[in-house]
Image (cartoon, rainbow, N blue to C red):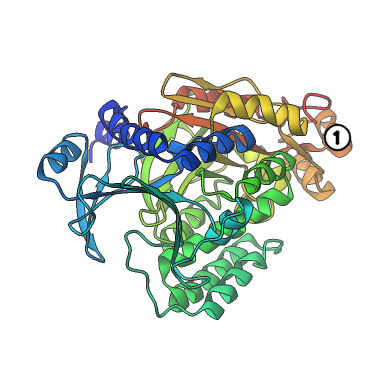
Amino acid sequence: MSNVNLLEQFKWECQPAAENFVSGKVDALLSKIPQAAVLAERLKDEASVRFIDMVDTILLHRDDAQIDAIRAAGWTRQNESAGFTILTNELGLFPPIAINTQQPRGTVCIDLKVEFVSDFLAANDLQRDVVGEPLSQMRSAVLHEKDGFTLAAIERHGLRGYSPDLSIKPADVLSVLEAFRLRPRFVENDVDAFKATQDLIDNGIAKIGRPYTCDLFFAAEREYWMKRNRAARAQKSRQDRRGIGWANHDHHTYRSSREAFPMLVSVFEKLGFHCRERFYAGLEAGWGAQVMEEPVTGIITFNDVDMSPQELMGDFSHEGFSGKPDKLGTVGLWCGLHGEAFLQAGMHHLEAQFDFDHLRDHLEIEAGVKTMKPFTDFEYLTQAFTEGERWKVDRNRIENLLKTNHITQEQAEQFRVDGAIGSHLENLERNQGFKGFNQKGVSEIIAATDPRKQMAGTSR
């Protein structure tokens, strides 16, 4: 593969025709079902979440002209599941379209994605029959029906389509989740900690399959991250008012040392991820990233690491890096202060999909959580961090960084007294199905969150 193809292999573009198709179906349903329109307003008002971002699947009657329009808008990949023909759009972030001849002609059903159907029903005071056993790969409930339109809630755990693995045992699901929640993070040797987690993943795959194991692993990761981030807890509480959990997650971000980076990639590949686009911020920034995606769950990770421009073109995700830099970059210093994001520190941030302006305003009003200046402000993509959570730094880590000349005496003293910025929640709004990232904006926020620049008093 040439260097040009390596960097341009994933060129995400806006998909206005596909967005118009989805928004047309959503608008039609909201206009026909008053309760759905009320829910959409409450999602925005109480959780800053847009209804359209929560659409899991659109179910339609087979219609040749309609299929032609769907394909023209980008839905091309096809598979069969439980009598449905399912089309997916690989050009952007859009829900699958499920087509079934048994669906009455002219009707539309929208499945709304939630983390747990029972939580959603309880939060919205709804008494509905739930299809699917607790802890199964899929559960759903019809919420409202009117004039050929149906709104349902659906939870998925490592499943695309409508054919769950009925052999999965609830006790195995709970045991795998428990193992991930209790996995060893504070181990003297990071290599041993990675190996222990790999063993837990292998055990999970053997019990409940790879996709469900992946789903549970990241549920535990979000839980650990929330314990260390007040903005996350405040926003999760808002989303729990409407019972959606973290079903609106966009990507999970990990900061890694150069030494641990191949291990991080290897663990994610074991969970079913493949490598997508890579980033390099430029000569002065000194960092790069590998984006990874798991196609069944749709989970995306953004994995940051210190690196040089010469290292970008190599297979750094698998072969790693040779030599140690004279100076730690933003990512390396963060890991030096807090530990690996995969282990001791937990995720650097979770990015979820919101109504950007609404979340910025209401997080500050309701929880006193301020948002930093947007590092991306396009019509199709807006991104900003909440102000960082300041963590206490272990004295041994400070001394090690001081001995290796990666921080000054003054910086060491400030880290001892005031700690250092650890994690964020990221506010993101995507439009026109844009699936990519703003490399320049990401580069700027990486530089802005360097612990050496975030000293006492800048963020609380």
Of all residues, the one furthest to the right in this rendering is 417
Q: Residue 403: x, y in percent?
A: 77, 42
Depicted 268 relative to depicted 435: above or below: below
Q: Residue 408: x, y in percent?
A: 79, 30
Q: Nearer the viewer, residue 376 or 24?
A: 24
Q: Residues within 10 Å of mark 1 (few under 14, many from 20)?
A: some
Lateral position of residue 305 relative to residue 137, left or right: right
- Residue at 30% across / 36% down in the picture? 10
Is residue 371 shown to the viewer in this render?
A: no
**Quadrant of the drawing holding the N terminus:** top left
- Residue at 46% across / 60% down in the picture? 141
Q: Nearer the viewer, residue 50 or 413?
A: 50
Depicted 338 relative to depicted 193: above or below: above
The quadrant where residue 391 appears = top right
Is residue 157 shown to the viewer in this render?
A: yes
Depicted 455 relative to depicted 186: above or below: above
Of all residues, the one furthest to the left in this rendering is 64
Q: Residue 338: x, y in percent?
A: 71, 46
Q: Residue 76: x, y in percent?
A: 19, 45
Of all residues, the one furthest to the front in this rendering is 147
Lateral position of residue 350 relative to residue 313, left or right: right
**Helix, strand or loop at disc 1?**
helix
Disc 1 marks a residue whose amino acid type is Asp
**Quadrant of the drawing holding the C terminus:** top right
Depicted 189 relative to depicted 359: above or below: below
The quadrant where residue 272 appears = bottom left
According to the image, label 1 marks what residue? Answer: 418
- Residue at 38% across / 62% down in the picture? 159
Lateral position of residue 39 relative to residue 87, left or right: right
